[in-house]
Image: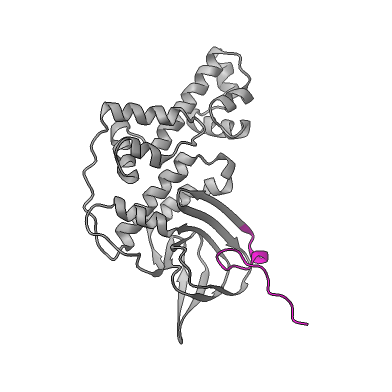
């Protein structure tokens, strides 16, 4: 009797061989973290589809894969910080050798088209396929995203969408047919738009506001809004919102007797441990100790 094939995830990896399998989504981009210590990984394949593009960032060294292209193949080594970019519009077949740890993002066709529409200058039709090339910028962005995948309940929508927009811009600039866009110079937001953007962020202290909605309210593309907001405030939208949450928490801890767990909820944190970790990173003391010192 022939054994049934092992179940695979949406990227073609054998599910039982994955030691870390994490997913999080953000406005047209699906982020994944896939890691395995297994050295006998075997074959992976995905049929051609209209899913868009897949980008992988290797978080560790030591992985090697043999990719089949029709009747020939090519072998590639991955070091930490090397990337691959491929289109789902082609069949993909590869033999995987050695353990791997990848942060991946799946950019849907609709999200890619929107990013193209927001792009100033020469339009592109796709992304260049690359395998195993170093990309320090994308590697740093992947490292910034990794904690959000480890603790998805604590990941704010503002942060995930902000990172997604930044990554889309980088992909178009770096792999969009080798063509550079004519990006508009970042100017400060008007007072009305600054006020509106901050109001929309503060209305969702838990970070569930939509970057796309705020950018639209300011009559800007997502990437241009993020750059302009940073020029205006000195912080990205996520950094600014995080600072407001911490300031509100300080007020509640200093001037009220509200329990710490309730302060965490009122300031939009996932739970008390999330609040304690972020507050300590920003202030240098736990909420309880800071409250005692203030009194």
Q: Is residue 11 magenta?
A: yes
Foreground residue, 154 or 75? 154
Foreground residue, 119 or 274? 119
Give the residue drawn at x 63%, y 68%. Answer: 14
Q: Work out which quarter of the rendered image holds the N terminus and state it.
A: bottom right
The quarter holding residue 9 reads bottom right
Using residue 144 as the reference point, say whether residue 112 is left or right of it.
left
Give the residue drawn at x 39%, y 36%. Answer: 237
* Residue 232 coordinates in the image, percent (x, y): 29, 32
* Residue 254 coordinates in the image, percent (x, y): 53, 15
* Residue 205 coordinates in the image, percent (x, y): 49, 30
* Residue 96 coordinates in the image, percent (x, y): 55, 73
Foreground residue, 68 or 283? 68
The quarter holding residue 233 reads top left
User: Magenta stretch?
Assistant: 1-20
Visible residue check, residue 187:
yes
Q: Main secondary structure of the magenta part?
A: loop
Using residue 150 as the reference point, say whether residue 202 is left or right of it.
left
Q: Residue furthest right?
A: 1
Q: Work out which quarter of the rendered image holds the C terminus and state it.
A: top right
């Amino acid at each position: 009797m022939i054994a049934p094939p092992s179940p695979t995830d949406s990227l073609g990896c054998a599910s039982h061989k994955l030691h870390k399998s994490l997913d999080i989504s953000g406005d047209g981009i699906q982020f994944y973290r896939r890691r395995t210590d297994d050295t006998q990984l075997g074959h992976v394949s995905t049929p051609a589809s209209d899913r868009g593009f897949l980008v992988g960032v290797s978080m560790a060294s030591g992985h090697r894969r043999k990719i089949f292209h029709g009747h020939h193949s090519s072998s590639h080594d991955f070091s930490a910080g090397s990337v691959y970019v491929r289109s789902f519009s082609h069949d993909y077949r590869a033999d995987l050798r050695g353990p791997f740890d990848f942060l991946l993002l799946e950019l849907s066709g609709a999200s890619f088209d929107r990013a193209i529409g927001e792009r100033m200058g020469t339009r592109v039709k796709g992304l260049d396929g690359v395998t195993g090339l170093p990309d320090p910028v994308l590697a740093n962005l992947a490292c910034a995203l990794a904690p959000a995948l480890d603790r998805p309940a604590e990941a704010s929508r503002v942060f995930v969408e902000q990172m997604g927009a930044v990554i889309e811009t980088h992909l178009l600039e770096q792999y969009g047919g080798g063509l550079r866009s004519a990006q508009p110079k970042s100017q400060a937001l008007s007072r009305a738009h600054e006020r509106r953007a901050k109001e929309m962020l503060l209305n969702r202290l838990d970070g569930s506001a939509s970057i796309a909605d705020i950018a639209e309210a300011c009559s800007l593309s997502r990437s241009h809004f993020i750059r302009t907001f940073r020029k205006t405030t000195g912080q990205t939208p996520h950094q600014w919102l995080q600072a407001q949450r911490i300031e509100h928490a300080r007020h509640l801890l200093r001037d009220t007797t509200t329990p710490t767990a309730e302060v965490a909820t009122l300031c939009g944190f996932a739970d008390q441990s999330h609040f304690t970790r972020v507050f300590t990173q920003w202030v240098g003391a736990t909420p309880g100790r800071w409250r005692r010192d203030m009194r």
